[in-house]
Structure formats: C-alpha cells, structure tokens
Image: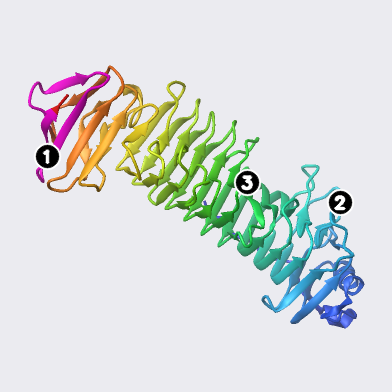
Amino acid sequence: MKHSHKQNPLATCSVNVKNYGARGDAHTIDSEAIQDAIVDVASRRGGIICFPPGEYVIDQSIRLPRAAPLILRGSGYAAEITASGALPQDAPIITFDDAPDMPAQFFGIEDLKLARSNDGPVLRHLSPTDWMRLTDFRMRNVHCHCVGRSATNVHLEGLLNCVLESVRVNGGGLGLYLQGSHVTIINLKVPNIDYSVTNGMDVMGGNMVFIGTRIGVCDEGFGVRLNSGALGGNIQFNGIGFEGETTAIQMDIGNISNVLITEPAISSPTNIGGIGLNIGEFARNVRVIGGTIASGVEGSCSVKINEGAREIRLEDVNIWGANEQIIQVPSTGVQHIYIRALKALPAQGPFVLTRGIIGTQDHLSEENTITAGEQPIYRMAFSYPVTIRHITDGHEAQELILLFDNDNTTIVGDGNIQLRTPAEETFTTGASLRLFYDGASWREIGRN
C-alpha cells in the first residue's frame, strides 16, 4: 500500500510568528501571539506559520481552525513549543476547533518539538462525526514529549490520506492513538526513556502502512495494539522493532484481518517480559515473514495463537524464548495455520507447542515440515497429533530427539527421513524417536 500526500493548494501565504509579537525566549508567554498569527493566516484562506529557532512558551492550547488549511513549520528541533505549568493538565499543546462540523484538510506540522513538563496530551484531533475528519494531514520531523504515565501523548482520530514521517513520541500512558484509514507512518519512534511510556501505540482502522517503527515500553500494557473496529484490517508493519517488558504486538478480539508483518525485531529480554506476538481470537489472514520474535519470560510464549484465529502464516521467522513453550496454539478452534522454515530456539527444555509443532492434519503446512535447531542435540515435543514428512536445515552429526505426548503422531519415512521399519509409523504417549543427520537425510538411531 502506498499513500501520497497532496501538496497544499492554498498554502501560498507565509508568516513569521515573531512578526506577531512572539519572543521565543523560553520565558515570555507566546500563546496570544501564536494564535494571532494563526487567525490572520486562516483569514487569508490558509498558509504557513513559521517558527524561527527558539523556545515558545504557551499557557493555553494552540487551536487550529478547521476552515482553512495551515502548516506549522519550525526549524528542526531548534524550534520548540513548550507548555508552561499554567496549561491545564487535560489541555493539549495543539488541538483543532470542534466547530464547524466539517473536515480539516491540508494541515501540517513540520520540524518542531512539542513538549510539556507535566502529565498531559501534546497533540489531539477528535472526530466525533464522520464529517470531522482530518484529511491530507502531514507530520514530519516532529518530537512530541510529555512527562507522566496517564495521558495519551498524541491522539489522532478520523485520519484519511495522511502521512507521519520521522515522528518521535516520548512519554504518556499511551504514546500514540491512531484511528482512520489510508495512513502511512515512516520512521516512527516511541522510545521508553526513564520508564515513561506505559503503552506504545493503539491502532484502530485499516489500510495503514508502518515502515521502520521502533517501540519501547515499560512493564505494563502493550507495545502495539490492533483494535477491532469497522475498518480493522489491511495493516502492514515493515521492519517493526520492539524492546520492552510486556506484550509487543497485541491483536484484540474481533475484526482484525489482513495483517502483514515483515522482518520484525521483537525482543522482550527481561524476566518479566510478555508475549512477542499475541494473535487475537477470530483474527484472520495474519502473515509474518522473516525477522525475530523473542520473549524473555519463563511461563509465557513468544507467539500465541488464540482460539478462532484462521489463516495464520509464519514464514522464515526466528522464534526463541526463555520458556520451553515458545509457540502456543489452542487444542481446538483454529484453522489453516501454515508454518514454513521456522527456526525455533527455546533456551531450555524441549520445543513444546500446545497443539504440536503445527496443528492437526488439516492445519499443517503443505510440506508437513519441521525445522531442526542449531544445538548438537535438539529436542522437540508434540502434545497434539501431527504428521511429519520432512525436516529442514540440520547440520552434519546433529542429533534430533522427538518426544511424544499424544497417541497419534505420525512420522513418514520418505524424503529426508529414514526410519528403520516400517516406512510410516504412528507414535504414542511416552514414546521417543532419535534421529541422526548424516548430511543428506535424518536416519533413525533409536526409539523408546
């Protein structure tokens, strides 16, 4: 999905806030001067309000009128709008007028830092009706900073055809809330500095593309949550990175569909870490390609597939964790799980999945394939019936021990699996099979 940002056809006027009395000296209250500049430019049918380098202190929210397109343009992070302690805690630094009932179109915030020293919102757009959308909105090189762990730092509703590029969000109970459609987010960073971010990003909508996202959160909540909703689908994460002590990607129960995650770098390294990827109930058509998903918590798992999920694909993914159960699948209620070239590396114990390596016969990948790990002796345990026809990877002189905790796991001795006899055999609870890789195939060397 590609979304382009249209050029503002009305932004022909450009003014300097200092011409309206703004000082930018980190002491003078510049709220009135900034608002005067905005009102003047809006009266000319829109334009650009420029902020030269400096720190512009405000004690009331900057309000953008919906009737005229406006761009607030700074000078990199050298231009900063700072909230004084007089700004009410529930008042954002920048917000949009809630009247008239019309869309706000061709707005932008560029090359600015927005900061407050207390717990409260930084940027807010509400969309109580379908008419009050924010369309063709662009944020570029913007740093939004607040202190505290209760407010939503950036709250944007009703987005349509919008682009957020090189945006950094730090602090808040929720770093970023996005609701809308046809949105592109490039190089978004929600860092966890001094444990200031409780939840990273809440996404509700569809047709969104995230490129180069980096999330860091503390010991509560989630990194990214995909909310169920009327437009809860068609979401891409290309190169998402996560490091924290909680669930990295959480999909809610409900209408979550058509999610593509490529080359993730998900790490939860501490002992209180959560689930790397939690695929919600009734999620549909979720695909993960490449990358790494890891959980550092004992008693948890790296990937959890919940009941009712269907059409789930994990391809060429490195999955590891501190706990032996690194992928969890319920015993009933899932359909069409496809796993290919999975490299699963539990830090301790056998490789255990609730339903077995892939699932029941109807839910196996077409290759019915498992992947050998890197250890000299590697153990895999199966707690639900599966059929295994092929083992990928492996290195010469490696030993593979298969443990069975069900009464109907079938190993097919053709292809690169060589059983002593017969060519196909079903194993029962308590049985085990030892295989040795000779560089070409896996040969049976013992069983119990």
Q: What is the distance, in whole Å, between disc 1 and disc 2 at their CAs?
A: 69 Å
Q: Earlier in the sequence, mark 1 or mark 3?
A: 3
Amino acid type, label 3 = Glu
Q: Quadrant of the C terminus?
A: top left
Q: What is the distance, in whole Å, between disc 1 and disc 3 at their CAs?
A: 47 Å
Q: Give the residues drawn in magenta, as a range.
A: 418-446
The answer, for residue 391, to whether it is visible in the render is: yes
What is the crowding at mark 1: few (fewer than 14 residues within 10 Å), some, or many (at least 20)?
some
Mark 3 vs mark 2: give the one in front.
3
Q: Earlier in the sequence, mark 3 or mark 2?
A: 2
Amino acid type, label 1 = Ser
Q: Are marks 1 and 2 in contact (CB under 8 Å)?
A: no
- Residue 93 forms part of the magenta stretch: no
Q: Label for residue 441?
A: 1
Task: Tell me the quarter of the picture where residue 339 sits.
Answer: top left
Amino acid type, label 2 = Asp
Q: Are marks 1 and 3 in contact (CB under 8 Å)?
A: no
Question: Badge 2 is on which residue?
Answer: 98
Q: At which x and y percent is residue 72?
A: 76, 70
Q: Are marks 3 and 2 in contact (CB under 8 Å)?
A: no
SS class, disc 3: loop
